[in-house]
Amino acid sequence: MAGQPLQLQRTTYRDLNGQVRPGNPTCGESALDMEQYYQPLERFHASSLHGWGVAAGLRVAATLNGTGVTVLPGIALDSNGMHIFLISGQQAEISKDTPGVTPLVPVTDSGVVIPTASMTGDQYLVIQFWETFDSQAQDNGIFRYTHTPWLHFVDATHLTYDGSSIILAKVSFGSSTTGQIAALADMRQRADWHVERTHEASIHGAGVAAGLGVMVTLNSAGVTVLPGIALDGNGQYISLANGGQAETDPNAAAPGATPRLVPITDTGVVIPTTGLIGDKYLTIQFWETAASETLATTLQSVAPFHFVHTPWLRFQDVAGFVNDGTSIILAKVSFGTSANAGLVTDLALDQRQETSLAVGNISIQRGITTSPATNKKAINNDESGTIRAYTTGGLDITAPNATDEIHMERDDGHNVAKISLGAQAVVARRDNGTESVTIDTQSGSIASANLSADFSVRQNSLYMSGGIGWSSLTYNAHHNDANNQWVFPDTSHPAVTVEMDDNSGVPRFQVWSTTSGNHTGWMERFAINGNSGDVSTVGGNLSTGMITATGEIAVKNAQGTDTVILNANTATIEAGASGVSGSITAYDKSHAATCIINGDNGKINTKALYATGNVTAANSSGGGWALGGFATQGGVGLRAANGGIQAELGTSQYAGDFTGNVNISGSLHVSGPISKSGGGFKIDHPCDPQNKYLTHSFVESPDRKNIYDGIAILDANGEAIVELPEWFTALNRDVRYQLTCIGGYAPVCISQKIHGSSFKIAGGKPEMEVSWQVTGIRQDAWACAHPLSVEEMKQPEEQGHYLHPAENGADPAVHSHTLRHS
């Protein structure tokens, strides 16, 4: 601090015997009026009203893996009511075990550095009230005692919690290197931890109380924090108010750090983001900065008795962040990387926590993300609802918007119910989050996966009734359990009931009805036996025009026979025909079999198979075909038009296998390599297309070569630059060149190889035509991933078989395709 230091000194008083009384003022001797009344009164006032601990400042800073701990200036109060000042311009006692062993050290604006040599394990840094006899300060025989706070380390066995010394920090030292700091934990005990702060921390919790909105412009640098108030886990208010200042140095807690304060305006504070990358939490933390006050002119000094509230705004890494209530998260901010470092790419609420300080009821707030303008994002607070207790009893929960929902959760985090205001429904949930019961508050309808009740449930004229072992769904009737009688609300209309029961262990499904002649007399109409599956009708026939099912329909005839026939006019479907177990046969009107399905092996033998949709065939036996077609009398064995056939590779080598000629009248696309014995094009002969074909062969190569050619006309210098496609070098490697002069001779050459997407020809004559050819080998991703194997061994099972046995002088029976068809 600037100016002359303030020396806190005490005059040495004489006792009642006229002798100079030396020693600490805590001695129990008789004293003069100041020490006997005013000083004890002030100490009693301080200790009783404020308690003991740190009043302001006294932060501890250190460098991990370094030595030495810095204690910044500040003020504390011990349990005896003694003020402990660590002020710039004073001196401090830093002896380890006994005061006076180490010379006093000066206190600067940056505080005091406590040496850590020989320290091991966990140590506690404490500050204690102490005075040092000043033998040099004599005035007419009166000696003085100077206030020299004692800063020293103690281990856990010697640590006291009676307030005689104030704990500032816990410092852990490395086991291999003594004195080297491994960890530092702030343990300052606050002197102002009284009822108010206990109330704030316990009742409201940590979070944003009001304001503190966050605004960004996407893909731009800088983040704006609007004015507001937060509450930390220690019950301390953190106020970002217009006219104040905020700390923005991310390393403000480092030893010797110089405050980086910025003014707070109506529009808040802009936090710089230079060089930031990845995801960061923007946090606000309670912070104080020492400020100077000009004291009375008689003291002629300036001292830091005054500490200014300067909330600390900084970015912290998301990974490893400990949300212990010390720092309050305002937003998660995402930044670009590399050239876009420091530019904001996204803004999210993430773990932003809101707290409420409303009066008369509990006002619940939430953080919301908005887009106030194009390419801008903002985070602010919004009221989510209120909870209010009625004086006559009950609880009122209010949400501000019709589209909001009110959720109810258990202590274990399961969301068990909600009230949807927009949908006007009450919903109950299971532990897994599925909604099991929904009540429509407008119509009164109940939707439930498992609705249980011991009384009748009604929806218009439809009733649910039941008892032990039975349940029913009934139109115009319900069961009265009290007298075991049925009640018919409207006897002018008949009734119908569907009943499910467990009659003596036999599950049954039954349909009963009354008749037009007797509206209250039940008659059984239809029944299903749950054990046997038998279906029976009572007093009528079972008639249907069509049976539709998404599952299985089974029609069984009497025991001992093997044929079930379904006859649709002249066409017939027969099951188990001719004694063949499991076969299904379809016959035409002349009773000729057109399709036979073998139930034992799944084979289908049909005269024709035609489908406008998909045909799926599978063969899991390990051999043969899943779907085969054979042509007779010059026909086509398998025909597909407009994408009608799809074949997929199973466990065998081939998704499709064709023997004979295959004709494709459209385009053929192959995503993998093509293997062939020969190939080329075959077209109508350009000179005689009506009567002849023209055939050319492919150009073959052991490499996947691409060929490019053209005619270049040389300029006045006998040179030409040939432009190739811009993707040439990306596609090709191992480039080869050929040049041929047209109409004359010249020693032409490639004067400049391909660079970028062009090459240069030189050595010719002006206006000469030069034919050029360039080849390259493919180096695209697919070609690199699937290199061409020029020579390869046949698989063991293929050896001795030929793709072309006759041409190689072998028996046609050892053709390779016989392996696939065996």
Image: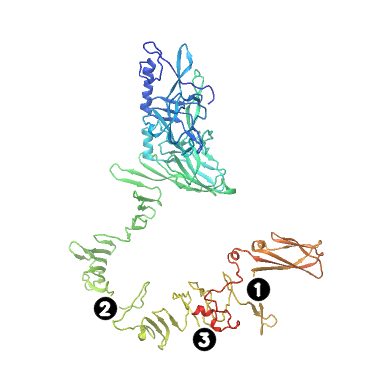
Tags 1 and 3 touching, CB below 8 Å: no
Q: Which mark is residue 700?
A: 1
Q: Is residue 770 visible?
A: yes
At label 1, which amino acid type do we have? Glu
Decide if residue 452 is on the left or right side of residue 820: left
Q: Classify 10 Å Cα crowding around label 2: few (below 14), some (14-19), many (20 and above).
A: few
Residue 666: x percent and y percent?
Answer: 58, 75
Q: Earlier in the sequence, mark 1 or mark 3?
A: 3
Q: CA distance from mark 2 to mark 1?
A: 80 Å
In this view, the residue in front, 628 or 803, is 803
Please say which color scheme the image uses.
rainbow
Callout 2 secondary element? loop
Q: Residue at left 39%, top 44%?
A: 364
- The circle on residue 632 is 3
In the drawing, what numbered circle is on residue 57?
none
Give above or below for 660 relative to 278.
below
Q: Is residue 244 left or right of residue 738?
A: left
As measured in the structure, the alpha-carbon distance from the residue carrying label 1 to the one carrying label 3 is 37 Å
Q: Residue at x 35, y 39 (%)?
A: 360
Name the quadrant containing residue 801. bottom right
Residue 326, x across and y down, in percent: 44, 39
Question: What number is the disc on residue 540?
Answer: 2
Which of discs 2 and 1 lies nearer the camera? The answer is: 1
Give percent across and percent down for residue 281: 49, 44
